[in-house]
Amino acid sequence: MTAVDTNVLVRLLTGDEPSQAAAARRLFASEPIWIAKTVLLETAWVLRSLYGFETDAIRDALTKLLGLKNVHAEEESSVAAALALTAHGIELADAMHLCGRPPGARFVSFDKPFIRRAGRAGVSDISAL
């Protein structure tokens, strides 16, 4: 298994550096890949901030990537749940914080708009501090 860095994912998803994109495609086609949550977060930030990707495009790209048979992510179920929450207007980082909490843990924040969006998305045990 090989763990990858953000720049490998960005090359794979954008193809902006043809030789690096080709190397990333070969790697993903040849062996099991592991992706850390921090790499996914940084990739989303780079795609949004530097490449102008919309939230839906980022969610779709990361969801498809994580759906590949040979690709594994840190805390896969919480990452999948976090990606799903982005469809409800929740930022990926906030969604990952929320979905990564231990079972039964209450989540508190000072960010009232985030709390409202999470509540509308069906998240329980979240409240303002």
Image (cartoon, rainbow, N blue to C red):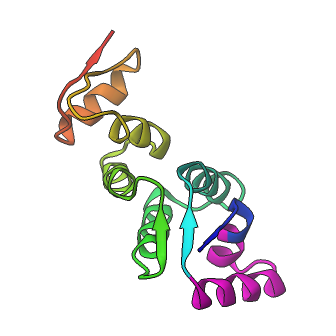
Looking at the image, residue 103 lies above or below residue 23: above
Total numbered badges shown on the rendered structure: 0
Q: Nearer the viewer, residue 55 or 76?
A: 76
Residue 47: x and y in percent read 63, 60
The residue at 68%/90% (across/down) is 26
**Residue 25 pos. (x, y %):** 66, 87
12 falls in the magenta region: yes
Expressed as whole percent of the image width and height from the top left, the position of residue 85 reads 32, 49
Relative side of 18 to 48, left or right: right
In the rendered structure, which segment of residues is drawn in magenta?
A: 9-31
The quarter of the rendered structure image containing the C terminus is top left
Q: Is residue 91 left or right of residue 129?
A: right
Q: Seen in the image, is 13 located left or right of residue 107?
A: right
Give the quarter of the image for residue 19: bottom right
Location of residue 69 (image quadrant): bottom left
Q: Residue at x 40, y 53 (%)?
A: 79
Q: Image quadrant of residue 91?
A: top left
Answer above or below: position of 97 versus 107: below
Instruction: Where is residue 60? Give x, y as percent.
Output: 42, 69
The residue that appears at 47% across and 62% down in the rendered structure is: 73
Quadrant (top left/top right/bottom left/bottom right) for the N terminus: bottom right
Farthest residue, direction front? 1
The dominant secondary structure in magenta is: helix
Q: Is residue 30 magenta?
A: yes
Q: In this rendering, would 61 be left or right of 109? A: right
